[in-house]
Image (spheres, rainbow, N blue to C red):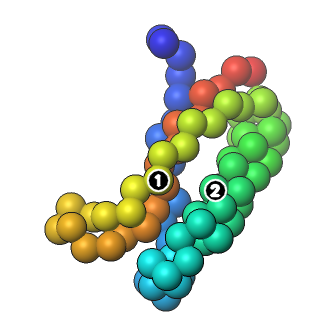
Amino acid sequence: MPVPYFHVVFTLPTLAGEIAFQNKAAVYAILFRAAAETLTTIAAEPRHLGAQIGVTAVPHTWGQTLQQNPHSRYRALSSP
C-alpha cells in the first residue's frame, strides 16, 4: 500500500536474549507487548505523530551469522 510507514527494530539485550533461548513464549510475549505499547504511546503524542497507528510485527531470532539474536521488526503505519 502506498502509505507512509516507519521501520523500527527492538533488540533484546544479550542477557535477555539468553533467557529468551530457554523461555521463548514468555519472553517474546513480553517483547511484543512492550514494543506495541511503546509505539502506540509515542505515536499518539502530538509532538511526535499525534496519530493512532497500526502495527505489523515479525520476530527475528537469528542474526546474519546464524547466531541467536532475538529481536523484532515493526512497520508502523500512520494516519494523522
Res. 13 visible in picture: no
Residue at 48% x, 12% y: name it: 1
Q: Amino acid at mark 1?
A: Pro
- Residue 31's x, y, as percent? 62, 63
Look at the picture and state if 10 lies above or below 53: below
Mark found first going from the N terminus, 2 or 1: 2
**Element type where label 2 sits in the image:** helix
Mark 2 and mark 1: span between their CA atoms?
Answer: 9 Å
Q: Are marks 2 and 1 in contact (CB under 8 Å)?
A: yes
Q: Quadrant of the C terminus?
A: top right
Which residue is identified by label 1? Answer: 59
Which residue is identified by label 2? Answer: 32
Q: Amino acid at mark 2?
A: Phe
Look at the picture and state if 64 lies above or below 14: above
Q: Is residue 77 left or right of residue 79?
A: left
Q: Is residue 55 left or right of residue 66?
A: right
